[in-house]
Image (cartoon, rainbow, N blue to C red):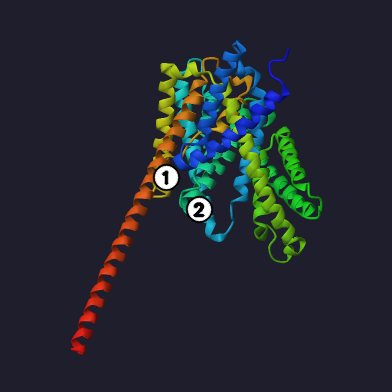
Amino acid sequence: MEILSSNDFIIGASVIIILSFWFNGISKKTNIPSVLMLIVLGVVLQYAARFFLKKDIDFSKTLTNALALLGTIGLIMIVLEAALELELRRDKIIPILKSMAIALIGLGLSAWIAALILYQFIPEMTMQSAWLYATPLSILSSAIIIPSVSGLPEEKKEFHIYESTFSDIMGIMLFYFLVGGLHAEEGSGVAGFATNLLLTIVIALVASYAIVLIFQKIKSQAKLFLLIAVLLLLYAIGKTMHLSSLIIILIFGLVISNTKVFFPGKTAIFLESERINQIYHELHIITLETAFVVRTFFFVIFGLTIVISSLFSLSVALISLLIIVSIYAIRFVVLRVFIGKDIFPQLFIAPRGLITVLLFYAIPKEAEIANFESGILLFVIIGTSLIMTWAMIKDKKKMNTILDEIDEEVQERNEAEDDLNTKLEDVANTELDGDSN
């Protein structure tokens, strides 16, 4: 007898999407990341399933493949969504390069310190494995950051979009570079990495130009999911060729959102501007909606796989707290060097999330350490998300206070002007009365 029918799955999936939409509304009002609410929902569903089904189900084993699939699709959609929002203009070059430098330095230093902490405190942990485990813990989560910073000033919002996107891509590249180091015979190393990167960029540019020129000629109304399928195919083929596939997605997004840059001068004659704009806007909507749905199910399923008991280990708490402290200490120094004193709330917007989980499950068997507690992963994700929540709430209160002060000043100025006008009217009336007498 089947435990759950297809109708049960449809009802469950529908309710989860509705709740996720509601969580987004709560998130905008409270600045609590909807991701945290989705993880909690997954944990609640885990215990509810065990209670009602009267079985001790190991969700971590049964749902790992689903988590990996959803994570990959979600990652592609999130990077594409971010790329579609990036404008390549001369006045944006400095912010982009600065964000890239901050992301790269922050990633490298955070991974190095986290690796030292893991190597020191976890028995049997080799330094090579420590780097593999530390890298996912050092990558910013664009899945959490991009939806959370919409209320920030434009300059700070753009910084976080650039930084988190670069952190995602460079973190994944670093992870698979380290994985390649496990198999020295496959020609890995700095030279192999540079060749891989260059080849990926060339393929990405050729594919992006071809897609833009071909798809603008397609008249069918159902072409956008065909385009998504092509991008997923390119990503999968890139992965089988050991390329940095996310760069393909990023470059395509940049090409279609900045056609004036990639089709300069006379080359613009190859474009049908109206069709390209239509594809861009429709693609933007589809990636936004798809990313929302995939992100929803990813974090709910992650919540289902969490072993809550691992959070109550003293060693897990100690290691996690050391990693979290190192994240913000490094971030403070890097932001002060590149940005200056105005680093709030940017300092505390450094959550870990989707890619951290996705890469954790991608660690090769030969590098796995049996003594590594998955609770460290959860602790860091929840800890950094809560710290971001606190910073965003405090920043919102600060902004509201500033707005209230401005309103008070405007009101006082208006009252002063009214008083002055009243006095002038009184003086004018007095003078008129004197003249009439």
Q: Is 63 above or below relative to 392?
A: above
Residue drawn at 42 percent across, 35 percent down: 387
Q: Is 433 above or below relative to 196?
A: below
Q: Quadrant of the C terminus?
A: bottom left
Residue drawn at 78 percent across, 47 percent down: 223
Asked if disc 2 and disc 1 are in contact, CB closer than 8 Å, the reply is: no
17 displayed left or right of 315: right
Amino acid found under the numbered disc labelled 2: Pro
Label at residue 95? 2
341 displayed left or right of 316: left
Q: Is 295 above or below relative to 41?
A: below
- SS type, badge 2: helix
Rendering coords of residue 68 (x, y %): 65, 28
Q: Residue furthest front?
A: 437
Rendering coords of residue 78 (x, y %): 61, 41
The mark that comes first in sequence, 2 or 1, is 2
Relative depth, front residue between 42 and 210? 42
Relative depth, front residue between 44 and 310? 44
Relative depth, front residue between 426 and 269? 426
- SS type, badge 1: helix
Residue drawn at 66 percent across, 40 percent down: 290
Label at residue 335? 1
Q: Is 303 above or below relative to 275?
A: above
Rendering coords of residue 46 (x, y %): 57, 20
The total of numbered circles placed on residues is: 2
